[in-house]
Amino acid sequence: MNYLLAILLPPLSIVLTGRPIIGILVFFIWIPALFFSGGLTHPMFILLAWFLIFHAREDRRHRH
């Protein structure tokens, strides 16, 4: 579910993975990047969100 959210709203999915500061920072970079590049930078933010989701899942797996 969070991977799907990362496609639509990468900053929100980053916040939901437990990294609120990075999510807020990405939000303030993501909005202007969408407008100035015409959406060409959106895949970069999707990949960042997917990486952070995967990393959080691996951390949880190693803790238990």
Image (spheres, rainbow, N blue to C red):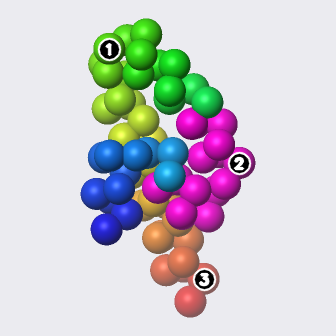
Point 41% across, 22% down: residue? 34
Q: Position of residue 3 (x, y in %)?
A: 32, 59
> Magenta part of the protein: which range?
13-27
Q: Which residue is mark 1?
A: 38
What's under tag 1, amino acid-wise?
A: Gly
Q: CA distance from mark 2 to mark 1?
A: 25 Å
Q: Residue furthest top?
A: 36
The answer to whether mark 1 and mark 3 are in CB contact below 8 A is no
What's under tag 2, amino acid-wise?
A: Ile
Q: Which residue is mark 3?
A: 63
Residue 10 is marked as none
Query: Pointer 3: residues within 10 angstroms few (<14), some, or many (20+)?
Result: few
Point 31% across, 68% down: residue? 1
Tell me if residue 51 can be seen.
no
Residue 21 is marked as 2
What's under tag 3, amino acid-wise?
A: Arg
Residue 17 falls in image quadrant: bottom right
Query: Pointer 2: residues within 10 angstroms few (<14), some, or many (20+)?
Result: few
The tag earlier along the polypeptide, 1 or 3, is 1
Query: Pointer 1: residues within 10 angstroms few (<14), some, or many (20+)?
Result: few
